[in-house]
Amino acid sequence: MTILDEIKPTRRQRLYDLVRDAGIDVSHWETTKGNSSSAASNPKYCYNWSFVRDDVVVLNLWHQEMEETEGVVRCALNPRETARQDTCVRVARAQQMDLALRQAKMAHLPIRVIINAGARKKASGNTSQVKHRLLDSVEWSVESYDTLTGHCTLARGKPQPVFIDQFTAWAEGFESPKKKTVTTEVTERCSKVRRQVLERANGYCEYCKSPGLNTPTGQIFLETHHVIPLSEGGPDKPDNVVALCPNHHREAHHGATQDSIRQQLLAHLKTIA
């Protein structure tokens, strides 16, 4: 039996209950209906495709639009394009879903997926009819999201970081530096800043534009570098940090051209600010 077979819904469950079980507050569903017994059928919420909380995104996805490849279940979707082509209230629902996907991507939020099975709307004038649904027990994540087109691919399971630097590599065991006891004062680098810079670089050295190193786990390795060093009062912010290939990172610290590299990197950061 495939994973897709295992997660195919076989029972009709209420969206209200599944959204609540995923961690979303549903008490406001009662507001416009007036009582808790009819809250689950509140049309203001029960037909939505997405729900967002500060630390989780909940999405309605169709089982028949999922694919399984080498043991990984994925779902490709583009609600932004749906909003362009559709009409009436579905436009707002699609736009809301696109916003939820962007939030999940930018904030690295986990996604809980409500899997629907039934008759999926295919043409204008038809309506979708859900026969069965369930809340997947496994978290999903945004594998890719194109900010220009809105095309998105979701994957079942927690993703590995696509991009790593020298600090991430040590933490994950990619490198095994020798350990020794020292007494010193260090400034801790912000992991969120490093992650933002690595994603901005998209796998390429921001100085020479050469691709980063491919690791055995399929990740792309670059080294993050403070253009104005922290020891000189440089801020630990994306507008002072770049991703470099190991050679140019060493040169930026120790090479005869380090001053020239610093000026070029500062000019580069101004162009993307």
Image (cartoon, rainbow, N blue to C red):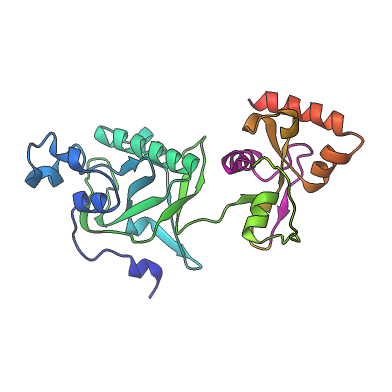
Seen from the viewer's position, the closer of residues 178 and 226 is 178
Q: Is residue 66 left or right of residue 71?
A: left
Identified at 60% across, 51% down, the residue is 162
Residue 23 vertical position relative to residue 31 in the rendered view, above or below: below
Quarter of the N terminus within the rendering: bottom left
Q: Give, as a single range, the part of the protein colored magenta.
A: 189-215
Seen from the viewer's position, the closer of residues 152 and 58 is 58
Identified at 64% across, 52% down, the residue is 168
Seen from the viewer's position, the closer of residues 22 and 114 is 22
Quarter of the C terminus within the rendering: top right
Q: Is residue 35 left or right of residue 73?
A: left
Question: Which quarter of the figure has residue 157?
Answer: bottom left
One can see residue 233 in this view: yes
One can see residue 165 in this view: no
Question: Which quarter of the figure has residue 186?
Answer: top right
Question: Which quarter of the figure has residue 8?
Answer: bottom left
Identified at 34% across, 53% down, the residue is 113
Where residue 123 appears, x then y in whole percent? 28, 44
Q: Is residue 163 part of the magenta span, yes or no? A: no
Seen from the viewer's position, the closer of residues 8 and 263 is 263
Q: Is residue 147 left or right of residue 210?
A: left
Residue 115 vertical position relative to residue 222 in the rendered view, above or below: below
Q: Is residue 146 left or right of residue 38?
A: right
Residue farthest along the front direction in this orientation: 183
Residue 72 vertical position relative to residue 249 in the rendered view, above or below: below
Where residue 229 appears, x then y in whole percent? 74, 33
Residue farthest along the bottom direction in this orientation: 1
Residue farthest along the right direction in this orientation: 256
Identified at 79% across, 39% down, the residue is 208
Q: Tell me how many marks there are.
A: 0
Where residue 187 appears, x then y in whole percent? 67, 40
Q: Is residue 198 part of the magenta span, yes or no? A: yes
